[in-house]
Structure formats: C-alpha cells, structure tokens
Image (tube, grey):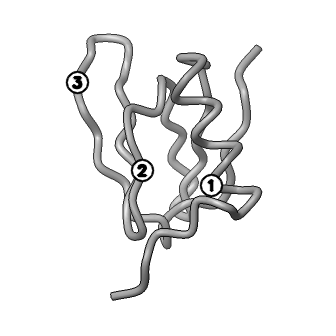
C-alpha cells in the first residue's frame, strides 16, 4: 500500500472541502449523483455525509467527478 500523498492538488482540494464543510455533488461512473459533504478521504475511498448525516462510502475508482454544489 502506498502512502497517502497529501501534496497532490486533488487531495488538497478535497481536504479544503472537508475543512470548509463544503456541499458537493459527487457523480459516479454509474451516473448516480450523491449530494452532501465529504467527511474523510483515504487512498481508496471517500466518505460522504448525506443530508440526514448518513455516511456513504465511495470507492475512488467509482467517481466520475466531484464539484461544489453552490
């Protein structure tokens, strides 16, 4: 397992979303759309909190894109 590279721009941007509790839209390769806030990230997954504070674990490989929903 490789070390989590916190210096990568994509990792830093997601960390800013977490820190700022930014509302995001996360589109999956299956065309599903998740809306919520990113709770945490690691090398393999991103955890999204939906509006009811339910944790949704998403594989990074399943993500088509992430954008702010403002």
Q: Secondary structure at mark 3?
A: loop
Q: Are marks 1 and 2 in contact (CB under 8 Å)?
A: yes
Residue annotated with mark 3: 54
**Quadrant of the frame with the C terminus:** top right
First in sequence: mark 1 vs mark 3: 1
* Residue at the spot 61% in from the left edge and 30% down from the top edge: 17
Residue annotated with mark 1: 11
**Residue 51's quadrant in the figure?**
top left
State the CA–CA distance, disc 1 to disc 2: 8 Å
Residue 19, given in percent of the width and then of the height, sits at: 54, 24
Residue 45, given in percent of the width and then of the height, sits at: 37, 60
* Residue at the spot 58% in from the left edge and 39% down from the top edge: 15
- The disc at residue 41 is 2
Indicate which label's residue lies in the foreground, 1 or 3: 1
* Residue nearest the viewer, comparing 68 with 29: 68
Residue 26, given in percent of the width and then of the height, sits at: 58, 42
Q: Secondary structure at mark 1?
A: helix
Is 57 located above or below residue 33 in the figure? below
Q: Residues within 10 Å of mark 1 (few under 14, many from 20)?
A: some
* Residue nearest the viewer, comparing 34 with 8: 8
Is 69 located above or below residue 15 in the figure? above
Q: Is residue 45 left or right of residue 27?
A: left
Indicate which label's residue lies in the foreground, 2 or 3: 2
Q: Secondary structure at mark 2?
A: strand
First in sequence: mark 1 vs mark 2: 1
Quick one: which residue is furthest to the left in this view? Answer: 54
* Residue at the spot 29% in from the left edge and 40% down from the top edge: 56
């Amino acid at each position: 397992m490789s070390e989590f590279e916190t210096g990568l721009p994509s990792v830093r941007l997601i960390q800013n979303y977490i820190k700022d509790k930014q509302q995001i839209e996360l589109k999956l390769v299956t065309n599903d759309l998740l809306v919520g806030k990113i709770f945490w990230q690691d090398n393999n997954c991103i955890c999204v909190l939906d509006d009811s504070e339910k944790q949704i674990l998403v594989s990074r490989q399943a993500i088509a894109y992430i954008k702010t929903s403002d």
